[in-house]
Amino acid sequence: MLKYSFSRVLVAIPTLLILIIISFLLMHAAPGGPFTSERPLPPQVLANIQAKYGLDDPLYVQLWEYLKGIIFHFDFGPSFQRKDLTVNEIIAQGFPITLTYGGLSFIVATLIGGTLGIVAAIRQNTIIDYFAVGISIGAQVLPNFVMAPLLVWLFTLGLGWLPGGGWNGGAWPNLIMPVIALSTSYMASIARITRSSMLEVLNSNYIRTARAKGLPERTVILRHALKPSLVPLISYLGVAFVGMITGSVVIDIYFSTGGMGVAFVNSALNRDYSVMMGITILIGALTIVFALLADLLYAWVDPKIRY
Amino acid sequence: MNNITEVKGRSLWSDARRRFFQNKAAVAGLIALTTIVLISFIGPYFAVWSNEEIDWDVMGSAATLGMPSFESGHYFGTDDLGRDLYSRVLQGTRVSLMVGVIGAGISVLVGTIYGTVAGYVGGRTDQIMMRTVDILMSIPFMFVIILLLVVFGRSIGMLFLGIGLLSWLDMSRIVRGQTLSLKNKEFVEAARATGVSTPTIIMRHIIPNLLGIVAIYATLLVPAMILTESFISFLGLGVQEPLTSWGALISEGAGTIRYDTEWQLIAPLIFFVITLFSFFFIGDGLRDALDPKDR
């Protein structure tokens, strides 16, 4: 277990480095520098500005400086477009918001999806099962960018129950629609995965043994079937988490929640490369850490898995 | 003696075809998908307006004049600029389907070759190749694609490149797993014993046996690619005007829904939802048909 964890961490580090280098090289392959504007600067001024930001150094020196900033100071450098802010400040504004509704969606998707899947498996081929399967099939064609406008159409324009956007300090009426929009398709996948793994467990020999011993159905399910049936879900949770963070881009734009997604898309549209890179790398780091945690958890829960 | 009829052999594929056509959902999906493809190619001949033409009478008052109607020739209504939504939806359908099919095509080509080589050669080569895939898989590709699109300019070619970069990873893993189990089968051993070269074994013996699982997975990849493209286009970073796609159209419709022009959202959404459903059902049907032990 220790050896496995160690080797897994060893793979995670180069992954992150590769991500940083790819985004760095992409940024430098871009036509035009960050200070190219419609009115060309006098060459002397441009040279001075570039010297200030270290842009006249050879590429490998710049890469090294950038890496050093990230690793030792957790510093992504200044924003090229919003000159009064650093990338760190821009991320710090949006990240807590993204994490709030992203985390909530993650919890909602896991709890509701998991429950739905388990209940559907226990009551296989009943109305409840068909209902759950129907929902999970329907929801997989409703990604966040489809759910968001449909929800606004229904709850804001139609019924007038919820505000159509804004953050408002994270008040719950502002949270409902983002969370539903973000979690629906993942809830569907989680329900499907849980249902099929629960069915597999329920058909296995040791469950038959437990039933043959005369244990009440409640005990059979809660004590014997539940835990192993959740194992396949673990590896999906990392994927789901990343999907929800990525989906926050849509949520921020459509609901004006002011999270990190809006900073990312604005920087993409304004070619603010340093902000784009900072957010890409941060999300990459989160992705890698989550995949790592999922793998370790998986190896810990299921003793049969040894790589 | 004459009335003994010869027992006709049933191949794997004819068996699979029979099972597939017994699956009602899969057949319905196939019919719906064919219909949408036909509409998107034949439909433009019935359009009154092209996808770029602006109906100046409607422009600016789409909510009152831009309704779907046969008299004005705007079968699906118009968008906010007075452009005909019918033509635009059909044009977006072609783009989205093309992105899906080409993305899946790249994944089939690259993923199959990569996966079979890794699985068949094995040993250190396999280790290195699969570690590379592991590393690439943990990169947040949605963000890298957007980075690519911004840095090198938005174009359909760049979009294909970005989506192609991402799509083959899963495929190569699946193919490798399948190859590992195939390569120890007797018929491969027999081929090796009779001195068949490695490339020939891969092309003649391994890949044909992989086709089933590749076909299933490719069918499920098409909607995944369409979703990726729609996501990027929804953010306004995908295809550029006058070209459009489902994601871009849904984004426009979503943006104007506050002005009572819900048809601008609904028209592309119906095409989007029906197509995704069809692909999922066809994929499920193929899985049941080609992989009998999985039922």
Image (spheres, rainbow, N blue to C red):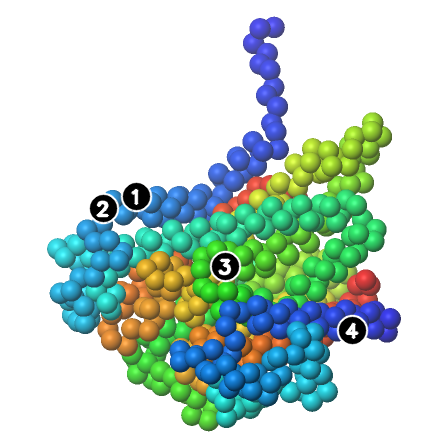
Q: Are marks 3 and 1 on the same chain?
A: yes
* Residue that mark 2 sits on: B46
Residue A52 in picture, x, y percent from top left: 59, 88
Disc 3 crowd, CA 10 A, few/some/many (<14, 14-19, 20+): some
Picture residue at 57% right of the left edge, 44% below the top: B215
The quadrant where residue B80 appears: bottom left
Picture residue at 66% right of the left edge, 74% below the top: A59
Q: Give the spatial CA distance, label 3 vs label 1.
A: 28 Å
Assess whether mark 4 and mark 2 are in contact (beta carbons under 8 angstroms).
no
- Residue B42: mark in rendering: 1
The quadrant where residue A287 appears: bottom right
Q: Earlier in the sequence, mark 2 or mark 3?
A: 2
Q: Give the spatial CA distance, label 2 vs label 4.
A: 60 Å
* Residue that mark 3 sits on: B158
The amino acid on which the numbered mark 4 sits, given as a three-letter code, is Val
Residue A190 in picture, x, y percent from top left: 58, 67
